Image: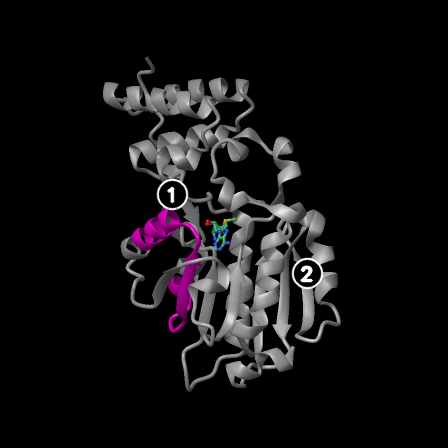
C-alpha cells in the first residue's frame, strides 16, 4: 500500500500505462477521489493517503484496467464550465461537442432580438450537457431538451437541478421531433445524434464500444439514419433564418453537407473542423421561415 498521495499516483500511472492508459487517467481518478483539482493533487504529493482512500483508489484502478471509462468510475464529467453527473445511462460528453455550444452562442449573439428570448431545441440531450451549457452561458435562452431514452432524461433532469438550471429548460421524451409539438418552432436546433455505422463497431476503442450506450452511438444506414430523420423534419421546426447545428462523423461530414447544398430549405451550409482539424460540425440556416399554417407545410415542400 502506498503511504503518500505522490507514491500512489506514481504507482497508478505506471500501472495504467501497462494497459495503454494515459497518466491523466490516474490523476483524474485520484483527484476526484480526494475531492481536489489536479493542481492541488500535485501540491499534496507528500500528504498521507488513508487506508480507506487507498482501497477505493485500488478498486477504481481495477475498473479502469478493465476498460471502464474514467467518467463512469468517478461519476462525473467536465463539460465547458459545468461538472456533470454521468453514468452508463448516457454518453460521456466529449470536448468536440463543446464546439457546438460555441456555434449556437455565436448565432444567438448575432441574431439577438430584444423583444423576445431565443428558443433552442437540443435533440438527444443525453446527460443534458449541450442544453445545460447553453442555459449556463446565455442569460435569456429558453431550452427544450429531448431524448428517446427515459433513463437519459432522468439523469439530464438531475443535472439540471444540481446546476440550478431547471427554470429555463424543459425536458421531453420521444423520438427526435416527436418529442415536441408539430407547430413548435425554434431559433436553433442543435444535436449530437448517433452517427457511427454498425459496421464500424469492431474498430471502436473498447472503452467506447463496451461501455457507452449503443443507442447513443450507432445509427443504421451506414451511420446516417438519424441524421436523415433530423434533416427531414428540422425545416418545419426552425424559424426563418434559424440555425441547425449537428455533430457528425468526420468521414461523412462532407457527404451530409452536399445533401443540403443548394437544397430548397437551406442556405449558408458550412462544415466546421474540431480542435484537431477534422470536419465534425455542420451548420445550416433555414432559408424560408415556417411563418405559415401547419396545413400548408406539404405545399411548401
Ligand atoms: C451521441 S449521444 C449525445 C448525447 C449528448 N447530447 C452529448 O452530446 O453528449 C445521442 C443521444 O441521442 C439519443 N437518441 C438516440 N436515438 C434517438 C432518437 N431516435 N430520438 C431521440 N433521441 C435519440 C440517445 O439516447 C443519446 O442520448
Identify the residue at horizontal 48%, vertical 38% (top origin). 212
Q: Mark 2 points at which residue?
A: 271
Where residue 140 appears, as percent x and y from the top left, is 38, 73
Mark before the other along the chain sequence, 1 or 2:
1
72 is within the stretch colored magenta = no
- 262 or 12, nearer to the observer: 262
The quadrant of the picture occupied by the C terminus is: bottom right
Report the front residue among 4 and 93: 93
Residue 149 forms part of the magenta stretch: yes
Residue 276 appears in the picture as rendered: no
Percent position of residue 264, x then y: 70, 76
Looking at mark 1, is its residue's CB closer than 8 Å to ligand 1? no
Q: In which quarter of the image is residue 243?
A: bottom right
Q: Residue furthest top?
A: 1
**Residue 107 in sight from this viewpoint:** yes
Task: Respond yes or no on whether mark 2 lies under 8 Å from ligand 1.
Answer: no
Looking at the rendering, the stretch of residues picked out in magenta corresponds to 135-159
Mark 1 and mark 2: span between their CA atoms? 29 Å
How many numbered dots are placed on residues in this image? Answer: 2
Few, some or many residues within 10 Å of mark 2 (<14, 14–19, 20+) = many
Name the quadrant of the N terminus. Answer: top left
Residue that appears at 37% across and 50% down: 150
Judging from the image, what secondary structure is the residue with disc 1 in?
loop
176 in relation to 198, above or below: below
Q: What residue is disc 1 on?
A: 86
Q: Is residue 45 placed above or below 130 in the rendered structure?
A: above
Left or right of 129, for residue 234: right
Q: 98 left or right of 156?
A: right
Q: Which residue is drawn at 49% across and 80% down?
A: 112
Amino acid at each position: 500500500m502506498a503511504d503518500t498521495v505522490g507514491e500512489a499516483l506514481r504507482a497508478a500511472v505506471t500501472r495504467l500505462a501497462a494497459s495503454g492508459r494515459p497518466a491523466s487517467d490516474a490523476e483524474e481518478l485520484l483527484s476526484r477521489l480526494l475531492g481536489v483539482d489536479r493542481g492541488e493533487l500535485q501540491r499534496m504529493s507528500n500528504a498521507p493517503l488513508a487506508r480507506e482512500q487507498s482501497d477505493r483508489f485500488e478498486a477504481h484502478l481495477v475498473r479502469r484496467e478493465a476498460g471502464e471509462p474514467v467518467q463512469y468510475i468517478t461519476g462525473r464529467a467536465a463539460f465547458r464550465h459545468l461538472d456533470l453527473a454521468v453514468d452508463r445511462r448516457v454518453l460521456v460528453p466529449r470536448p468536440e461537442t463543446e464546439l457546438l455550444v460555441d456555434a449556437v452562442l455565436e448565432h444567438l449573439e448575432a441574431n439577438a432580438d430584444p423583444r423576445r428570448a431565443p428558443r433552442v431545441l437540443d435533440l438527444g440531450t443525453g446527460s443534458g450537457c449541450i442544453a445545460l451549457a447553453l442555459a449556463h452561458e446565455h442569460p435569456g435562452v429558453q431550452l427544450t431538451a429531448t431524448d428517446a431514452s427515459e433513463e437519459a432524461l432522468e439523469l439530464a433532469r438531475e443535472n439540471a437541478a444540481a446546476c440550478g438550471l431547471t427554470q429555463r429548460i424543459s425536458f421531453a421524451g420521444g423520438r427526435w421531433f416527436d418529442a415536441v409539438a408539430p407547430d413548435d418552432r425554434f431559433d436553433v436546433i442543435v444535436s449530437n445524434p448517433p452517427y457511427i455505422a454498425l459496421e464500424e463497431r469492431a474498430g471502436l476503442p473498447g472503452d467506447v464500444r463496451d461501455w457507452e450506450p449503443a443507442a447513443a452511438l450507432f445509427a443504421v444506414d451506414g451511420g446516417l439514419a438519424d441524421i436523415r430523420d433530423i434533416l427531414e423534419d428540422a425545416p418545419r421546426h426552425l424559424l426563418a433564418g434559424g440555425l441547425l447545428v449537428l455533430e457528425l462523423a468526420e468521414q461523412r461530414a462532407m457527404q451530409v453537407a452536399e445533401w443540403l447544398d443548394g437544397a430548397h430549405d437551406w442556405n449558408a451550409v458550412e462544415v466546421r473542423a474540431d480542435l484537431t482539424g477534422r470536419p465534425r460540425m455542420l451548420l445550416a440556416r433555414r432559408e424560408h421561415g415556417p411563418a405559415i399554417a401547419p396545413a400548408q407545410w406539404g405545399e411548401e415542400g
